[in-house]
Image (cartoon, grey):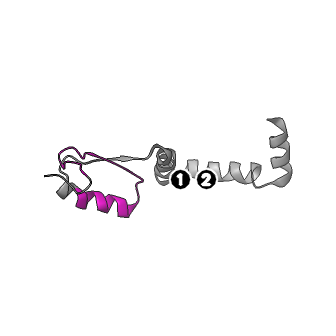
Amino acid sequence: MVHSHGVARENFCLLLTDATRYMTAARKLLKTLYPRLFQVTCMAHLPHNCAIKVRANYPAVDELIARVKAVTSKNRSRLTCFTSIG
């Protein structure tokens, strides 16, 4: 069977999306129409998703990162100092 866009259902196998809930739900629905469908999360979202996992599983690391950020990027005088270095 050929879809209206000229792509055979057997050949439609890649879905490149972010990992939001509505896209995951859409994949589940599309999988019924396209049995070979494989979802790939956009590589730009990969570091963000990894950071979320680290924050959830290692609260001490999350606290350390928050404190370093507060000391460096949220302090105007230190921020000026650090930007002048690089």
Range drawn in magenta = 6-30
Residue type (three-letter) at the residue carrying disc 2: Glu
Q: CA distance from mark 2 to mark 1?
A: 6 Å
- Residue under the point 83% across and 54% down: 76
Q: Relative to the observer, which residue lies in front, 85 or 42?
A: 42
Residue type (three-letter) at the residue carrying disc 1: Pro
Q: Are marks 2 and 1 in contact (CB under 8 Å)?
A: yes
Q: Relative to the observer, which residue lies in front, 64 or 50?
A: 50
The dot on residue 59 is 1
x and y percent of residue 65 in the render?
63, 49
Q: Is residue 15 above or below residue 85?
A: below
Q: Secondary structure at mark 1?
A: helix
Q: Relative to the observer, which residue lies in front, 25 or 80?
A: 25
Q: Is residue 40 above or below residue 27?
A: above
Q: Residue furthest top?
A: 86
Q: Is residue 73 above or below residue 26?
A: above
Q: Is residue 5 magenta?
A: no
Q: Tell me the residue that label 2 is attached to.
A: 63
Q: Secondary structure at mark 2?
A: helix
Give the class, few, some or many, for how many residues have Cα within 10 Å of label 1's Cα (few <14, many ≥20): few
x and y percent of residue 68 in the render?
70, 48
The dot on residue 11 is none
x and y percent of residue 9 in the render?
19, 50
Q: Is residue 27 magenta?
A: yes
- Residue under the point 20% across and 46% down: 36
Task: Indicate left or right for 66 with 46 as reference.
Answer: right
- Residue under the point 63% across and 48% down: 64
Task: Indicate left or right for 65 with 58 as reference.
Answer: right
